[in-house]
Image: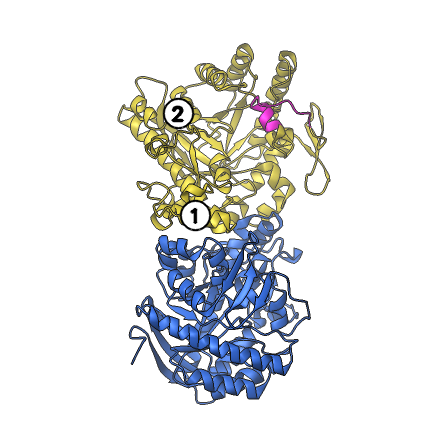
Chain colours: A blue, B yellow
Amino acid sequence: MNIYPNFRFEITTRDTNSSARCGLYHTPHGTIETPNFIFCGTKAAIKGATPEDMRRENTQIILANTYHLMLQPGSKIVKQLGGLHKMMGWSGPMFTDSGGFQIFSLGHGSISNEIKGKTLTPRNKTLLKITEEGAKFRSYIDGSYHLLTPEKSIEIQRDLGADLIVVLDECTPYNVDKNYTKESMRMSHRWALRSLEEFKKGNDYSQALYGIVQGGVYPDLRKESADFINDQNFFAHAIGGCLGAIKDEMYDIVAMVMSSLSKDRPVHLLGIGGIEDILNGVACGIDTFDCVHPTRLARHGGALVKRSLKRAEGDNTTTDHFNLANSRFRTDDTPIDPECECNTCKNFSRGYLHHLLKAKEMLGLQALTVHNVHFMNKFMKSIRDSIENNSFQQERSHWT
Amino acid sequence: MNIYPNFRFEITTRDTNSSARCGLYHTPHGTIETPNFIFCGTKAAIKGATPEDMRRENTQIILANTYHLMLQPGSKIVKQLGGLHKMMGWSGPMFTDSGGFQIFSLGHGSISNEIKGKTLTPRNKTLLKITEEGAKFRSYIDGSYHLLTPEKSIEIQRDLGADLIVVLDECTPYNVDKNYTKESMRMSHRWALRSLEEFKKGNDYSQALYGIVQGGVYPDLRKESADFINDQNFFAHAIGGCLGAIKDEMYDIVAMVMSSLSKDRPVHLLGIGGIEDILNGVACGIDTFDCVHPTRLARHGGALVKRSLKRAEGDNTTTDHFNLANSRFRTDDTPIDPECECNTCKNFSRGYLHHLLKAKEMLGLQALTVHNVHFMNKFMKSIRDSIENNSFQQERSHWT
């Protein structure tokens, strides 16, 4: 029985030299062209951009975070205000995560780095206990106690009302051993079944459920997890958990997981948004990505640009952006990128943006956010176009 | 000789029951319908709104502050970036002040209150000395020394390139005696002549110069100042300095000054933006107002609304706004004002705005700014319409 009658994922083109593919992802709030990027509206707002800005810069889908919204304002209030779409004034497709990632990363980002293999920090005390039942934690806002179970996560995500929702899982950090990773993964699988059960009970056909592949950096566990998820009635899959400490390890794990996952369901790579990471993910067959990077970078004065533009200006740093706070932009009356058609590049010079950053004017952060959103959407469109024109390999080289 | 060939102030309607009047104020960057309100873009940016937002919400004119811009980024850099209009992406009329007010209020607002008669605070040490030559002060940014003279203020305002510019004056606080006020006023008059001289020397006909009426709370000094300013070749007049400690005193001074000022030049009331103050000013014949209030209030969670709307909801506080951070708005799914046609009221509920404020999302401040800008523009339009329809007295009662 099709428990997702209002969702359809249509693969329209397959690359001949890689696993890259183009698709049309039909949801009750419209169609997403894939591969695509999902912007983070953590607390039901994109920091630095209005819904209008997002639409004007060609955004097709945004996400909000269950963890933040369950604590503030609370999912019942979001429901009273008409659900996320109505409340935010966003009529396009939306995604919510399960709340798990932030609980385990404890709302401080330290474990986020750890999951990405970067540091070894002790778990913060806001996470109190993980049991078979769920995860107990304290609110970072008022210290109140919460228990997030698989059932509760689905109920909250139902109240929030995004189109695409996700099962609760435990996100294991980099520094845990294989045995912990295995036990955790198996518990996540049991949580996935409970999530699916709860989803089916309240299914009003307005949402589609993602299963998550866990297994850390261990190929046999990733394979076991992919096989398990393939067998369940999920509409789509997400790749979560630790992807290793270095890029090559991540690419190997993603490639390995993708080789095991069902080829007909959409696949989302959680929390990844670097230019090269996206290109590699697309080559492995990933359909959607999300990351705070483009919008967070903007709030730190960074404007995403192609490496080739940086090189043309004699800037040989290997980052993905210009730092507009740099004094070399002080009297520069050209736009961030003369070829960019975003609202910022059409109206503001680098010199003005530099001034706004120095003067701590919020308009500077807004303007850079708009540029970075446009940049990511243009980047994803160029990927889609190149797959359709059978030139994906050439296109990759334009962005790195 | 007409030194302002590209400016014209046309009075189109005079109220029969007051000195209120409607006009068309033609500038090289377009026509301002008067009475009107000038929004503060202090550091060459409206806090919380893009130029696009301002236009969409019917804004006709904005200002920037000479004091802030001479220190950061510096007027020469603004000039290199094409002047304020081009740099900011604002193609409509613009106003700059002389820098005096902020030097004397020392960038901290304490003397701003004092000029408005509210407190008695000692002058901060960033103002070092006032001499016949000008005002010596230290930058609040880097401690560097600056001397602002009448000539320098005109030169800076020429580099900034606003349509409407202002002579340098000394703003006397409330707690100075009549003798100081008189001596200061006479020095301001000498500064006004020097400003005008400098203006004429570099006149390229793209700017119009305002003279400022000083004289504090003393009717004979105000009369002397108005007579002096009337006799000079200014395009327009501004009323500056201390207007008293209480509203009634302010209204008396404004009425008295207006009775002495030339009836054919536009008159600006500096730094005043309360609903009742504007209504009283208009009744005295004031054509333009400016104040940070609407945009600053937004950044503190306040949404401007008519008193009648507050009363209809049982809110009998006498402020001019709803405080959206108040928990009574938590689950309110109606817009700030159901009759408001601003972009915020069309898209966001009070409950969502409450959430955004609580979550410290900048979108909340942006949304309230947009609403307050729209409110002020609608308020000024209703004043103009009522003067044209000979119903200004009735209209006043709708807003208080």
Magenta span contains residue B120:
yes
Q: Nearer the viewer, residue B389 or A291?
A: A291
Marker disc for residue B353: 1
Q: Position of residue B385 (x, y in %)?
A: 30, 30
Q: Chain of mark 2?
A: B
Q: Residue furthest left?
A: B389
In the figure, is residue B269 to the left or right of B150? left
Start-end of magenta stretch:
B111-123
Q: Nearer the viewer, residue A198 or B198?
A: A198
In the figure, is residue A282 to the left or right of A252? left
Marker disc for residue A179: none
**Residue A176 figure quarter:** bottom right
Q: Residues within 10 Å of mark 1 (few under 14, many from 20)?
A: many
* Residue shown at 46% from the left, 18% from the top: B251
Q: Position of residue A276 (x, y in %)?
A: 56, 76
In the figure, is residue B12 to the left or right of A64? left
In the figure, is residue A189 to the left or right of B157? left
Q: Position of residue B220 (x, y in %)?
A: 54, 10
Q: Nearer the viewer, residue B119 or B100?
A: B119
Q: Which residue is mark 2?
A: B279
Q: Amino acid at mark 2?
A: Leu
Element type at marker 1? helix
